[in-house]
Image (spheres, rainbow, N blue to C red):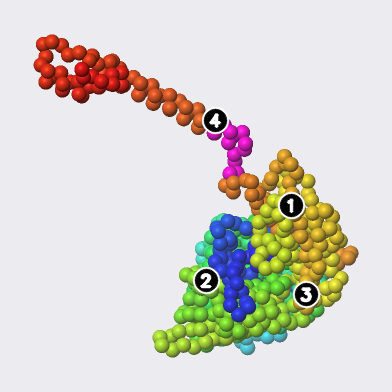
Amino acid sequence: MPGAGGHARCRRGRSGGKRAAGCGAQISGCLSSSRCCGRRAGGRKRRTIDLVPAEGCDLRPVAADPPVTLSYSTSTVPRGCVSSSSLHSANEVHVLGVQWSKVPSTTLNVSLTAPASGCTRPAVLVLQCSRCSASITSPCPELLVLTDAFVIQGSPTVQQRELPAAASKGQLLDWARGTYGGITSYSELRDPRAIHLRLGEDARSPPDCAPQERFNAAPHLDAEVFSHGMRSCASGSAHSTRTAHIIQLQPEHSSPVTEVNLSLSCPEPATGSHILILQSRANLTWILSPTSCNIQLLASGAYRIASLSPWPISGEPLPDTEQGLVAKALEKNYSIIASYSIIPVSPRITLEIQEREVPRKPPPMPTSPAPTLDTLPNDLLLMLRPWKCTDDTMEIIITRSHLEPIKDVVNITLRDISCQAEKNATHFMLRTPLSHCGTSLESQGNAKNELILSLSKGSVLRSARVAFQCQIPRELFLRLFPTAAFEVPQTELEVNKEAFVQASMRWDDYPADLQLKECWLVAAGTEPLLLVQANKAQSSSVAVLEEPPGSRARKIWRFRFTYAVPEGGHVPFSAALKCKAGLQNNTIFEKVLEVTVKDVWRPPNNRGLGLGAVLGITFGAFLIGALLTAGLWYIYSHTRPISKLQPVSTTAPASESSSTNHSIGSTQSTPCSTSSMA
């Protein structure tokens, strides 16, 4: 809403509600980072700055039981090699040495595929994976597996033997070479979740298998590995349910990867609000699997939702530094950085968000059916999540192009059908108070309603209902009003005129314990002006107003003040209203609202001319006018007819006739002769 997070200005709607007008805020709470407008109706940019608690955010390694599980696919192994030496032996031999950062809690899946020529040669798989359980599958009947892992599942045709103790760590490759005479491939892996191995030998490989660091094992090996290097931090309340997850891809300009498939899963039912920040190079496209997670997305490059959006959606530029990405999350009021991970560019990434109290479970296999015409509106809107709640309003902004898979959407309303969305060529937009349009408030800080889409197919009109809920953020909202009615917020502060400020926030626990700690007005070139402290006026120009009857679990503070500039002082063109609220001893929330300063004595567009410049221009204009007048008079005085400068004789020459004298005398009278006739 205006003045509270950079939302668009809206006008009143019917039935007591409000509907969006013009432009809207950046879509929040959705898998979309597109902006529907980002500017006010007049085209002038307006923004607010969300500040985080002063203690900041210091990223540190996560605890032993992290809140997320992150894995990604890669063909680069810490150490490995290939060779053609097995072509001269009885078997092709593949050696895998697996190391773990900690005791694995999941089963290692090892799958083998046959070469293009089929299973024509006996194969040997040497798997060193102590302290782990494994599932090994292969289509080839003549496969011998030597491993120290506990095999809990495998193909019936796989022959399994225990790995001899002689094949100890550091001697595994030498043991395999000595036992079988040749090595097809050797790979060391760290924390793998799954390994996909392609059988087959290549005569073009080196004659001997000499391990190399950071070896590219493609095309014979592809692994999915866990990322255990994530870090986290908490800034503010440790009980906040607003958490951020940041994935930063290491810059690899030579990488052939152009698309990243991201699988995302959350616990059911979702109990918190999350933001996922995906930073990569600009020419990368993220493809997200459909999910029911209550999550907001910010992504570099472009992205699309698989099976729902055939066209990629442009993301937004994101910082490429740790500090910048953390600041971006905190700026969105997600005070807990639950995970910050830096991983290589990968074609497939899996992120599983866990509840802190719930033990980690194996990832479920995707079994979601393909969307149908009946389920498509529900699936698509749950992916987009175009709804956003403040402490007293609900905003819904839907880009028309995102609804292209549904087609023929002619109207959108809420549960109360009188609350209709405004529409233009690019968007559907609706804004309403939380107390209107059939919205129900939950004690957990959620607002629930339904979107009703009217769909037209020829002459047939049908509707689709999509139930949704948006979380009411636990943050401080700051608004500036021109009158004591507190009706239409604005971001313009007029000098020597009363302005009315409202600070508000929801707090489910004990809203009465919240305090408005202080509010300042800060402008460049002037001393900061303390307006309110401990909810008491700190200046004769400030008056604290009575708190209005508040809604459930919502605290509201109001005050008025008059901004006066000392005589001879400079009137700034902008200022910042800063307020801080929180509990008595901790949990500080801050909000900064930027405003423009209006001075009735200053022309609105005269931003670069002072008094001296104005006087100089005035004097120059006067001087030019005087010189021009003098020049014109000079030209006029020197170009008059000579006859008008001399008197005319009143007596005609004797040689001329009387008729001629009469004619001349009647036509050449001058100011010097009032009568030219005798």
Start and end of the magenta stretch?
606-619
What residue is shown at x 68% (from left), y 53% (from top)? Answer: 494
- Residue under pointer 2: 427
| Amino acid type, label 3 | Gly
- Whole-angstrom CA distance, mark 1 to mark 3, is 28 Å
Residue 526 versus residue 504 in the image, above or below: above
Q: Is residue 203 above or below residue 196?
A: above
Whether residue 137 is visible here, answered yes or no, is no
Mark closest to the chain's N terminus, 3 or 2:
2
Q: Position of residue 273 (x, y in %)?
A: 71, 74
Distance (Cα) linking label 4 and label 2? 53 Å
Q: Nearer the viewer, mark 3 or mark 2?
A: 3
Q: Earlier in the sequence, mark 4 or mark 1?
A: 1
Which one is closest to the eye, mark 4 or mark 1?
A: 4
* Element type at mark 3: loop
Q: Nearer the viewer, residue 73 or 189?
A: 73
- Quarter holding residue 557: bottom right
Q: Is residue 324 left or right of residue 33?
A: right
Give the CA separation, mark 4 to mark 1: 35 Å
Tag in front: 1 or 3: 1
Residue 428: tell me if it is visible. yes
Give the CA separation, mark 2 to mark 1.
38 Å
Residue 490, horizontal then vertical, whole percent: 65, 61
What is the number of the mark on residue 550? Answer: 3
